[in-house]
């Protein structure tokens, strides 16, 4: 069962229109909400008058700061340097708005149409303040401070030091220094965010939030005290989720405002984010600048890396604002031996939408930078890009390998893996040498073809723990609950197949339910490629406990010692006498739960290769093929793995070729629609070949590694390398994404100026 | 000011009559007035394709049509594709070819594919990709969707 | 993202529609809605009254040959332009341009009259109409008038239409045997807004080019005629590097595209050169724009 490409469970429901996403939830008496947002990037709220809005027929309430407790502040949920608390976001603007799009008021009306009418009737008076819309602007000595009582817009500088970079850089045979920029991006899941809040019945009961996701138990623990209710009086229920990608399910202002509104009006309230809100209100991510230098030995081995990273985290430190850059910095050395590494990481607030995690937080940025440097090093030393990588990859006999970096106090130790074998398999599938020959052959016909490689390491199976619970039912089926959330990649299949394997029962008999705080007492959630690793192992442990419990009860019922009872395929037997799990469940509830504690993070080696043609006249890049692979530890469902790879490649292509959230000088988002925030389409994705290694991880009983973020984060480096390779004779260098046709043309023009020299 | 309009139309073969606000979008009419929530709303400005339905057999973005404009038409939504309880071949192909992950774009994708195959029963992969240019999927990388449509065009 | 309230009117005749427009200040005509609905949903347009052209019927849905012209009703949808046999025979440039508009679901709804009246300089059909030297038929309470496409597009989203006027048809000269057409766009993906586009009509008779018209889209405030490039080709043989030179002139002399979020002015100018060359190549296959073969 583990290892079988079983069809996606529950697919018929989604192909027939039977999904139940948050916007599909209907509760009797439900009203709809819309949020008034700051039109200014930085401004003082002088006054707000909601009288005209409240008087509009169909409007039930207008919430402003006066209705929101002072304690309603979005917490940072990772360990953070001292002083970080000064940069947190209140759920609603009290005195100062710090980004265009920050919530100022919330209207509850009969429907969304009327609610939007009412927004236009709220009279807010603003006193605009000077805005910082870039890291450079925010760090100028005379820059306006976003927060009173702080002496800098730099929240913290985190220093990582490994070895002795000064010594490594002295007399190095090759030193490359470059500045790289990675653009601001967001998840842009097809389904926007949303929430339905059902207030407690006056006679008693719970406040019920439908549409929560990602980490509902964590969010419950944050929200209940804000609402002044005990944990047990707050229920969060996940429904179908239209894509997570890291941004969805973090705690946002609306997660506080919408329930407060429901309790104020005493009726259920639904808020569905519209797309324009989605691009300004949901977390942004990724935007960083690297000032980096790398020192090589003459034979291509890396001596050391020195880097200063400045992350533009937007207006506030939200729940996971500090995560991406720190994860990225810790993994910057990637799959290579980097004996000496020094990194200063700045997290700078600016008057833009706050940032957080996005599929593989921090790594696409770091991989882009490092993999470009590897190609620059190869060019500088006259080595083939494949060869310079070979000479630096950490070898299996060096495992476990400690990179020497820390992120949030945790070491970066690769427990096991065979990066060289993975890389050679990538080259074999690319038919690398033949591809190089073909590159030369087509060049003679005027076609500029480039090959681009990237090797990288993904962080998977993040802690702290996960739970799973399995209940045998009298009808022969099983109900499975977990704290992990299901956002689309097939967690249902994974758990059903792992349980089916452990219990000897076909996977289709397991009903894996969406996460609900009412179903499992504790849990963590789905992020950091952790669902399969953490919930999978928890389910595996739960299955063993279920069998043990059933064995005890079967022994009683059959009147034999437990040791005489055997279990196979749902049947407990002692000699010729037998009883099934279903029969035992018919007597009384038969269920078992288990928790899997993550003692170490599981890392996965990954590699990707790209072949692309570039038209220098138009700057158009046509991807011809992508090959991508990773070490999955143990494959639970190969078809789903392929789906994750292909989907990840599509995501990475979007990040690399199209997506950038751009602001104007006053801090207004220019990419505020999907016309301007360009998402990848079918036409963008070339044939993708994926493969996997199975080197069991030592970090968990099943030997699994997570996969959800293995497909996307190498594309930036690999595609940039392919484009630069295709244009190598022109001396083209790409130091920023996305790689749009105008950017390629600009790079060609710059290279022409450089090679002609000052004239 | 909030003008109301009487509309009569057929939705999935069922005659429907309603008096609706003039500004009501067809997408909201289908979802909120008729309870046909299979038509998803992803952008409301005509880019993502999640709300694609067929109006008189031709694909349309339900977010860019007023309910009032649909008066007198025949609308088909994802809920209306099955025949005699059997799913449409495109629906079945999506299930078999792992052509969905989160499933949010799926109804719109399927409606676009149904129109494509009605016009061109044997499209090339390029023709499929181009026809899907108005439908965004953020999960699958599109290749399984293209494979599913190709398979539905040529049932084994 | 829901429209602000409006009063909805659906007149049953052109006359009734014009009466409504005349008596209702700020009324907005709704054709296929593929440009207007996004603006309504974003509340970037909040007209108090919407006049739906969906039931004006009759002539507005017709495509017919009339003397030397093809008359296409304003309500004809883009998808029909792509496939209609009369259009493909008599105005093939329009059919090709239509196939470049947006995506299938957009083409199924959008109309010829709608895109003409919207006067978006990045739109395909207005540029094709300029290349074809088409006439725009405009109805007002005083009757119909014909406006040359060259005179119709005044500025971005600014057609030569009075408040109580509407486009009812477009008249396109029927293609003659010697006519050649080309259409090219540079867009990231099919259906994306183009960096630039070019529509070409010319006649090749007696070995020389006559009646050369090159219209550019996304190259300025309106669909533009590349007059310098056109003059450089008029009366010339299509041989040699003339086509390439004309493309260069189109880029350097005939347009002044503004830069925006997606591309700099410089890039768009380069794009004009590329698409002009491609459109000329398409119109004159066998005469490579790069030089004599």
Image: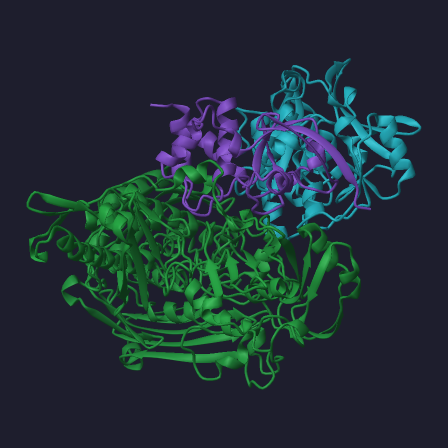
Compared to residue B32, the image places residue A313 above or below, namely below
Compared to residue B143, the image places residue A654 above or below, namely below
Residue A722's x, y, as percent? 37, 50
Q: Residue furthest right?
A: C142
Residue B1's x, y, as percent? 82, 46
Compared to residue C4, the image places residue B49 above or below, namely above
Whether residue A226 sits left or right of residue A555 in the image: it is right
Q: Nearer the viewer, residue C210 or A421?
A: A421
Tell me which chain appears cyan: C
Q: Residue furthest top?
A: C67
State which quadrant residue C11 falls in: top right
Whether residue A403 sits left or right of residue A125 in the image: it is left
Whether residue A342 sits left or right of residue C53 in the image: it is left
Q: How is the image coloured?
A: by chain
Compared to residue C198, the image places residue A565 above or below, namely below
Instruction: Please identify the quadrant where the C terminus of chain B is shown.
Output: top left
The residue at the point 60 percent across, 50 percent down is: A28
Q: Chain B: give its colour.
A: purple
Residue C35's x, y, as percent? 69, 40
State which quadrant residue C218 falls in: top right
Q: Is residue A311 visible?
A: no
Q: Nearer the viewer, residue A435 or A635?
A: A635
Tell me which chain appears green: A
Q: Nearer the viewer, residue A491 or A81?
A: A491
Residue C173's x, y, as percent? 74, 20
The residue at the point 44 percent across, 40 percent down is: A14
Q: Is residue A153 visible?
A: yes
């Amino acid at each position: 069962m583990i290892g079988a490409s079983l069809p996606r469970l529950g697919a018929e429901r989604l192909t027939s229109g039977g999904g139940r996403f948050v916007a599909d939830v209907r509760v009797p008496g439900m009203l709809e909400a819309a949020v008034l947002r700051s039109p200014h990037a930085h401004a003082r709220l002088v006054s707000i008058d909601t009288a005209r809005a409240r008087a509009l027929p169909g409007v039930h309430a207008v919430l402003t700061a006066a209705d929101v407790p002072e304690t309603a502040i979005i917490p940072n949920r990772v360990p953070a340097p001292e002083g970080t608390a000064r940069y947190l976001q209140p759920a609603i603007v009290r005195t100062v708005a710090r980004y265009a799009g920050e919530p100022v008021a919330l209207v509850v009306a009969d429907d969304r149409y009327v609610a939007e009418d009412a927004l236009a009737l709220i009279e807010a008076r603003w006193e605009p303040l000077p805005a910082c819309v870039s890291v450079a602007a925010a760090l100028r000595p005379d820059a306006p401070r976003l927060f009173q009582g702080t002496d800098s817009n730099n929240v913290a500088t985190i220093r990582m030091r490994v070895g002795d970079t000064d010594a490594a850089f002295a007399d190095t045979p090759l030193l490359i220094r470059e500045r790289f920029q990675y653009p601001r991006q967001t998840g842009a899941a097809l389904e926007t965010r949303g929430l339905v809040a059902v207030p407690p019945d006056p006679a008693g009961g719970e406040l019920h939030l439908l549409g929560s996701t990602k980490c509902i138990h964590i969010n419950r623990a944050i929200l209940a005290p804000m609402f002044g209710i005990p944990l047990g009086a707050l229920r969060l229920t996940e429904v179908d989720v239209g894509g997570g990608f890291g941004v969805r399910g973090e705690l946002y202002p609306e997660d506080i405002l919408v329930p407060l509104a429901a309790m104020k009006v005493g009726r259920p309230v639904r808020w569905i984010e519209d797309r324009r809100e989605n691009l300004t209100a949901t977390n942004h991510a990724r935007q960083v600048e690297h000032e980096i230098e790398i020192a090589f030995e003459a034979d291509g081995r890396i001596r050391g890396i020195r880097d200063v990273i400045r992350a533009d985290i937007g207006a506030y430190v939200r729940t996971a604002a500090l995560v991406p850059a720190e994860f990225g910095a810790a993994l910057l050395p990637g799959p290579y031996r980097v004996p000496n590494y020094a990194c200063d990481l700045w997290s700078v607030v600016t008057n833009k939408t706050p940032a957080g995690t996005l599929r593989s937080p921090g790594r696409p940025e770091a991989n882009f930078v490092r993999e470009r440097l590897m190609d620059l090093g190869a060019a500088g030393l006259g080595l083939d890009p494949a060869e310079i990588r070979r000479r630096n990859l950490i070898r299996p006999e060096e495992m476990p390998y400690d990179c020497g970096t820390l992120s949030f106090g945790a070491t970066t130790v690769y427990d096991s893996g065979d990066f060289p074998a993975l890389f050679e398999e990538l080259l074999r599938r690319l038919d690398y040498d033949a591809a190089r020959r073909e590159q030369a052959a087509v060049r003679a016909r005027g076609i500029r073809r480039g090959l681009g490689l990237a090797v990288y390491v993904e962080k998977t199976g993040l802690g702290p723990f996960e739970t799973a619970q399995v209940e045998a039912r009298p009808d022969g089926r099983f109900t499975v609950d977990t704290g992990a959330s299901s956002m689309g990649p097939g967690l249902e299949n994974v758990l059903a197949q792992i349980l089916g394997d452990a219990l000897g029962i076909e996977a289709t008999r397991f009903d894996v339910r969406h996460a609900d705080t009412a179903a499992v007492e504790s849990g963590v959630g789905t992020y950091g490629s952790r669902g399969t690793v953490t919930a999978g192992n928890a389910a595996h442990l739960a299955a063993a406990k279920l069998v043990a419990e059933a064995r005890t009860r079967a022994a009683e019922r059959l009147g034999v010692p437990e040791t005489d009872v055997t279990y196979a395929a749902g049947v407990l037997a002692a000699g010729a006498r037998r009883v099934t799990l279903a029969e035992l469940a018919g007597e009384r509830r038969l269920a078992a739960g288990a928790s899997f504690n993550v003692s170490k993070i599981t890392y996965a080696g990954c590699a990707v290769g790209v072949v692309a043609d570039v038209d220098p006249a138009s700057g158009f890049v046509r991807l011809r093929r992508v090959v991508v692979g990773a070490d999955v530890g143990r494959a639970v469902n190969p078809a789903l793995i392929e789906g994750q790879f292909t989907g990840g490649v599509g995501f990475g292509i979007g990040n690399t070729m199209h997506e950038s959230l751009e602001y104007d000088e006053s801090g207004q988002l220019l990419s505020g629609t999907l016309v301007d925030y360009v998402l990848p389409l079918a036409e963008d994705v070339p044939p993708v070949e994926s493969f996997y290694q199975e080197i069991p991880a030592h970090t968990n009983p099943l030997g699994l590694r997570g996969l959800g973020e293995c497909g996307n984060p190498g594309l930036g480096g690999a595609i940039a390398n392919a484009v630069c390779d295709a244009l190598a004779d022109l001396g083209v260098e790409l130091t920023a994404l996305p790689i749009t046709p105008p950017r390629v043309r600009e790079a060609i023009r710059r290279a022409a100026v450089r090679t002609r020299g000052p004239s | 000011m909030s003008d109301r309009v009487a509309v009569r139309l057929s939705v999935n073969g069922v005659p429907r009559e309603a008096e609706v606000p003039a500004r009501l979008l067809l997408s909201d009419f289908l979802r909120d007035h008729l309870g046909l929530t299979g038509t998803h709303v992803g952008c409301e400005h005509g880019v993502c394709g999640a709300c694609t339905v067929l109006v008189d057999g031709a694909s349309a973005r339900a977010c860019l049509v007023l309910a009032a404009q649909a008066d007198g038409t025949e609308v088909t939504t994802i809920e209306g594709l099955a025949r005699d309880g059997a799913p449409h071949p495109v629906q079945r192909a999506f299930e078999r070819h792992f052509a969905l992950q989160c499933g949010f774009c799926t109804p719109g994708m399927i409606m676009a594919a149904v129109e494509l195959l009605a016009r061109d029963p044997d499209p090339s992969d390029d023709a499929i990709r181009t026809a899907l240019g108005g439908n965004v999927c953020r999960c699958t990388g599109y290749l399984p969707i293209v494979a599913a449509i190709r398979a539905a065009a040529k049932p084994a | 993202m829901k429209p602000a309230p409006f009063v909805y009117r659906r007149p049953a005749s052109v006359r009734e529609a014009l009466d409504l427009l005349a008596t209702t200040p700020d009324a907005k005509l709704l054709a296929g809605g593929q440009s207007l609905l996004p603006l309504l949903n974003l509340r970037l347009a909040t007209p108090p009254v919407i006049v739906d052209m969906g039931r004006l019927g009759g002539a507005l849905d017709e495509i017919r040959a009339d003397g030397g012209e093809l008359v296409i009703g304003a309500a004809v949808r883009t998808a029909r332009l792509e496939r209609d046999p009369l259009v493909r025979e008599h105005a093939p440039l329009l059919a090709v341009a239509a196939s470049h508009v947006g995506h299938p679901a957009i083409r199924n709804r959008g109309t010829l009259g709608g895109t003409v009246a919207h006067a978006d300089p990045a739109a395909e059909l207005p540029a094709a109409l300029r290349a074809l030297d088409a006439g725009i038929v405009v109805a007002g309470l005083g009757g119909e008038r014909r406006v040359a496409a060259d005179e119709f597009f005044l500025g971005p989203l600014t057609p030569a239409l009075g408040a109580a006027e509407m486009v009812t048809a477009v008249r396109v000269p029927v293609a003659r045997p010697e006519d050649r057409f080309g259409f090219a766009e540079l867009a990231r993906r099919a259906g994306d807004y183009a960096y630039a586009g070019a529509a070409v009509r010319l006649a090749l008779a007696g070995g020389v080019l006559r009646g050369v018209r090159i219209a550019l889209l996304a190259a300025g405030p309106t669909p533009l005629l590349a007059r310098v490039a056109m003059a450089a080709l008029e009366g010339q043989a299509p041989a040699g590097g003339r086509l390439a030179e004309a493309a260069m002139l189109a880029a350097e002399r005939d347009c002044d595209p503004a830069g925006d979020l997606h591309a700099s002015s410089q890039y768009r100018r380069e794009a004009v050169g590329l698409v002009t060359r491609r459109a000329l190549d398409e119109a004159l296959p066998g005469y490579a724009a790069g030089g004599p073969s």
